[in-house]
Amino acid sequence: MQSSIHSQDNLHVAIIMDGNGRWATAKGLPRTSGHFAGIAALRDVVKAASGMGVATLSVYAFSSDNWRRPASEVAALMDLFRFYLVRDLTPLVEASIKLVAIGRRDRLSDDLARLLAHAEAVPARGTRLTLRLAIDYSSRDAILGAVAACRPRPTREELALQLAGNRAPADVDLLIRTGGEKRLSDFLLWEAAYAELYFTDRLWPDFRAHDLALALGAFRARDRRFGGLSTTAGQPTASADHDRASCAPASAR
């Protein structure tokens, strides 16, 4: 699995966008207002990310466990995803940002699944940034699916490729969670094995480019050892005693 161990650029940053509901409640607004306000935060961060050395930005938009929320809130979130894909796809393409979706598609409505497929198929004008939207996503389910698709004994590299949807895999360098909670919530567990973790009390609708800069500054000040003694010790090595395995084509997860 590739990783930007020695580079301060071409980073893979993952964000758990938490706190939308609490932001709205604090302002006496319905929770759905917080989700819509979160779109402005996402736009600001996406616009600034590539200029800060970020090559891949993975954002946790809707977990598989979020189906447990009230039906009205789930419906509002699905409407928000449609709105974002229709409204923002062209600006993303013009800004050389490639959109990719990870997560299950079979539980999404047909029209939303089609919008996601269309967004992924549209070529960006170059690729300054890859934006990965995690919708109906569970890392544990993704790992189980990747193992099932790779037989008989997959290597780390084969699993990583499968989890990345047969695109070039990249470890997460920095994982940010907004909203004050300190847990991973089943997000990119494999890819974040050696990620630096950054937690902030700022609620997602209030998170902006300068907050991303602060997180990246904290990240760049850390000594990433990857199990070794120093950052000059070299990249972590994968176990070499696995049998080669063949993986079925990655399905949309």
Image (spheres, rainbow, N blue to C red):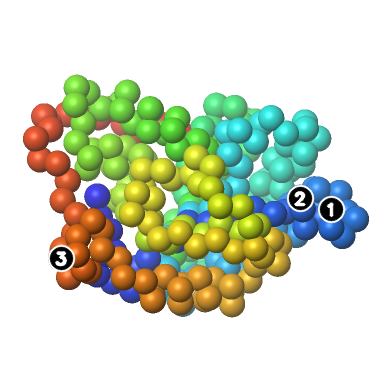
* Element marked by disc 2: helix
Instruction: Count every numbered label the image shows and give the total.
Output: 3
Compared to 79, does 225 lie above or below? below
Residue 240, position in %: x, y? 10, 40
Of residue 191 and residue 161, the one placed in the foreground of this image is 191
Q: Is disc 3 surrounded by few (<14), some (14 to 19) or many (20+) residues within 10 Å?
A: few
* Residue 25, label in figure: 1
**Residue 124 location in percent, x, y?**
45, 61
Q: Is 196 or 127 nearer to us in this picture?
A: 196
195, 1: nearer the viewer: 195
Pointer 1 or 3: first along the chain: 1
Q: How far apart are marks 1 and 2 (CA)?
A: 6 Å
Q: Residues within 10 Å of mark 2 (few under 14, many from 20)?
A: some
Q: Measure the alpha-carbon separation of dots 1 and 3.
A: 48 Å
Tag in front: 1 or 3: 3
Looking at the image, residue 200 sits to the left or right of residue 75; the answer is left
Residue type highlighted by circle 1 = Thr
Q: Where is residue 157 in the image (x, y as percent from the top left)?
A: 22, 42
Q: Residue at x 84, y 53 (%)?
A: 25
- Please say if the residues under marks 1 and 2 sit with CB atoms less than 8 Å apart: yes
Q: Which secondary structure, mark 1?
A: helix
